[in-house]
Amino acid sequence: MVHLTRRSLFGAAAAAAITAAGPPSAAASRAPRKSPASAARLTLPAPTGPHPIGTVSVHLVDPARPDPWHGNRRPRELMVQLWYPARGAPGHPVAPWLSPAAVPHFEQAQGIPAGALLLPDTHARMGAPVDRGRCGRPLLLYSPGLHSNRSLGTIVVEDLASHGYLVAAVDHTYDADQVAFPGGGVATYALPAVDDATIAEALAVRTADIRFVLHRLVSLNAGHNPDAARRRLPATLTGAFSLSQIGILGYSLGGATAAAAMRADPRLRAGINLDGSFPAPAARGTGRPFLLFGSDPGPGPGDPSWDQFWARQHGWKRELALLGTTHTSFTDLEILLPQAAPILGLTPDQVTQAIGTLDPRRAIHAQRDYVRAFFDLHLRRRDTRLLGRPSSRYPQIRFLR
């Protein structure tokens, strides 16, 4: 099965550097973490929309559903990050790309020496008041890849928020690299294997996660606070959702999650799979619009699951390929890896192997514009004509069918 997991990308050269340096001394391991003087702050490209953006994280607990990945069968717990158009936000701090509690786990999973990289900030203000618009904002849910996390979709997600969408990015606990909860607890990857049976179970768990999150967002829209500890949320979230305009997108296994969730929940009106294979339960298609957006070469030609989905997809459908890219290009690492390469000692060939030959800025520009064009067309009924035929402005996009 391909295009379901994301391998460690910073890893090979960084791990070699660690090995060459030898194991840390006991004194060094007890020393506080700090970044070397040479460390540079990684940056994300600015959103392109007219709205400033805000963000807030919500801790959700489903008391009716034991967590299948936790040995004690505790209730399923999730972290969801909301991104939205904001009104003026003076005094609200900028949100970090990754929760500070999760950073050491991210470094370890990626083979990055502790403190070697200063991870980026986002362009969103934490807890900023929501700009609800006249009739609420279209709602999108984002599902990341297996062994990934919600932060790796920030570039596309915050751009959607800057163009007037309210986006809920979901971390699927225990199949994510790491999920940081309020109070400092971090849940790390715990799936027993990566085989067909486990992937099918993970997909079922993720589908239930999406439906549960959607139920809680409906409650939030009605004025209730779904946070497990009733942490304060912006009051302007009440009434901010347009519940007749709900879509879903996902990367890798998150793309299959988008299709499976659409079959399970008719409230989801349109969906996108970003370069992910379809396990059998998700390959049955839907009667609603769905976009297949893959790398070069994408899942389509070498992955029969895309052909199976296409044959069974009876709603609007389109398949696009982003030329000169790889599976990783549909994550924030498309931008972050080239910045980190000189610090970690990665060669140009290693970077190209990881993210392809297309200029990262052009890759991100195309992803943002075509994802937004799809939801504009099918949720807002605004036709930008990008999805009707190839555009000379985007030679990196190939229309496959």
Image (cartoon, rainbow, N blue to C red):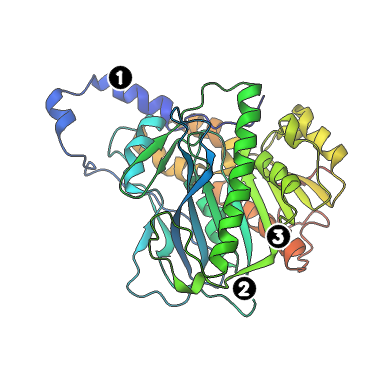
Query: Spatial distance from mark 1 to mark 2, Cα to Cα?
Result: 53 Å
Question: Which residue occupies the foreground of this view, 300 or 398?
Answer: 300
Q: Which mark is residue 117?
A: none
Number of other residues with Cα within 10 Å of mark 2, as a class: few under 14, some 14 to 19, many 20 or more: many
Question: Which residue occupies the foreground of this view, 367 or 303?
Answer: 303
Q: Which mark is residue 136?
A: 2
For the image, the number of numbered tags is: 3
Q: Which label's residue is closer to the chain start, 3 or 2?
A: 2
Element type at mark 1: helix
Number of other residues with Cα within 10 Å of mark 1, as a class: few under 14, some 14 to 19, many 20 or more: few
Q: Give x and y (percent) for residue 220.
A: 53, 64
- Position of 381 relative to 273 (above/below): below
Number of other residues with Cα within 10 Å of mark 3, as a class: few under 14, some 14 to 19, many 20 or more: many
Q: Which mark is residue 375?
A: 3
Q: Which mark is residue 19?
A: 1
Residue found 24% across the figure and 42% down from its top? 35
